[in-house]
Amino acid sequence: MPANDTIVRMASDVPTRLAAIVGNANVLSDERDAAAFATDWRKRYFGRPLAIVKPGNTTEAAAVVRLCSETRTALVPQGGNTGLCGGATPDASGEQIVLNLSRMNRIRALDPINNTITVEAGCVLLSVQHAADAAERLFPLSLAAEGSCEIGGNLSTNAGGVQVLRYGNARDLVLGLEVVLPSGEVWNGLRGLRKDNTGYDLKQLFIGAEGTLGVITAAVLKLFPKPRAQATAVVALGTPRDALRLLEHMQSRCGDRLTAFELFSAICVALVRKHFRVPAPFPTAYPQYVLLELSDTQPGSSVNALLEAALGEAVETEIALDAVIAKSGEQTKQLWALRENISEAQAAEGPNIKHDVSIPISRIAELIEETDAQLAAAFPGMRMVTFGHVGDGNLHYNVAHPEGSDANAFVARTPEVSRLVHDSVAAFGGSISAEHGLGQYKRAEILRYKSALEMDLMRTIKRALDPNGIMNPGKVL
């Protein structure tokens, strides 16, 4: 029998052989059972997987990948399935399996002296935060989906979140990884070392690779001293340029106590208040807002006094128009709700065109001004739902349909809108993906902005590690 026929015969028996590895209960092949795993969070991509397989440990995960390698069966690694670019969604061929890692959710070790925590890929981000907190430590990765997103997905997309300004992206929070390679071999790089100059830093290949080079099954993550005092405020501003002036002012006055610095527009506040009934931060509306937070490992009110003084100077020098500082834990939650509910509020408003971009911090205001003007001229009446982590140059530069118009008809113009936005971002020296990844959404788009050499280098790495092309095909490359 020809080798190709052998592979086809073996592939047809894959679900049965998967069940022998992980148990019948952990292989889902019925279309109704698989639906939740075959659709992305935004309901933009709909797949038809051969099966959903849920390993319970690294040994099982490796055996699944080894079977896929033998039968040339494509696999799609998946965690909490909260991604925004279709990176964890199978195609509609019915020939790909989804390797869901949610059962692999153990915290393997916590070393408070080394300030590290070793967790499996299926650990929900919030659970990792809570485990660190119980040990009087902080795991600083924080984003709106933290109650459902999982560490493996966070690392595979190099997630950012609201505290990158002080602590860095997911890439900066990892000391070691355990990875199942496309061959089914397991690379154990779970080292809790801050210095290890023994060749290539292999873990960085897999962080941000969106499961196209291997399956992250566990990680050693950095912990930090637990903050004992925090102070939160929302500041009213006239323009994005004022936000940059405020950022410079707060950094000079507060140093690394400045943990978060989040910009959002008046439209963002209006949508959150419309769909979530969050109290308005001020009696009157302002064009732009910044939510900022200071934190300190020293208990007491000094951080509050520092924030009050710094914001008082900002208002006096006309950088800021007004400011409100949270006086209680409940008010802190209300202020954060203005920022954290923006994505959900926009989803409730209807389909929209999302852009997750990054540019040099100093050029953010220029980008917003120039690109807003171009979009207004090309698409009259569109609404800019602009928000993001200005302290690290990351904007969620989203475009909503004109009020009262057909949202779906507007979203159908996504290629035109995104081309204008991405060309502008490139002109300002930026990136078309800051923290959401490329997935399948931006796979073709990236060819316009990366050089042929850079793309060829990426393909060379892909071919070297995944010669059979089974790892998350159709994503990134």
Image: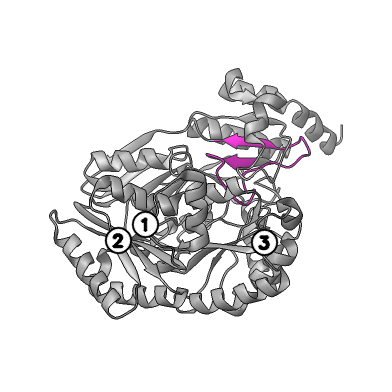
| Vertical order, 459 against 240 (above or below) | above
- Is there CB contact under 8 Å for labels 1 and 2? yes
Callout 2 secondary element: strand
User: Magenta stretch: residue 89 in it?
Assistant: yes
Residue 214 spot, x, y in % from top left = 57, 47
Most common secondary structure along the magenta stretch: loop
Q: Which residues are magenta?
A: 76-100
Q: Residue 262 or 67: which is nearer the viewer?
A: 262
Q: Earlier in the sequence, mark 2 or mark 3?
A: 2
User: Magenta stretch: residue 61 in it?
Assistant: no
- Left of 406 or right of it: where is 252? left
Callout 3 secondary element: helix
Q: Quadrant of residue 384?
A: bottom right
Q: Residue 220 or 440: which is nearer the viewer?
A: 440
Q: Which disc is residue 324 wearing?
A: 2
- What's the amino acid at mark 2? Val
Q: Earlier in the sequence, mark 1 or mark 3?
A: 1
Q: Which residue is mark 3?
A: 459
| Vertical order, 226 against 316 (above or below) | above
| Vertical order, 169 against 322 (above or below) | above
Q: Which residue is mark 1?
A: 281
Between the C-alphas of marks 1 and 3, the distance is 49 Å
Q: Quadrant of residue 69?
A: top right
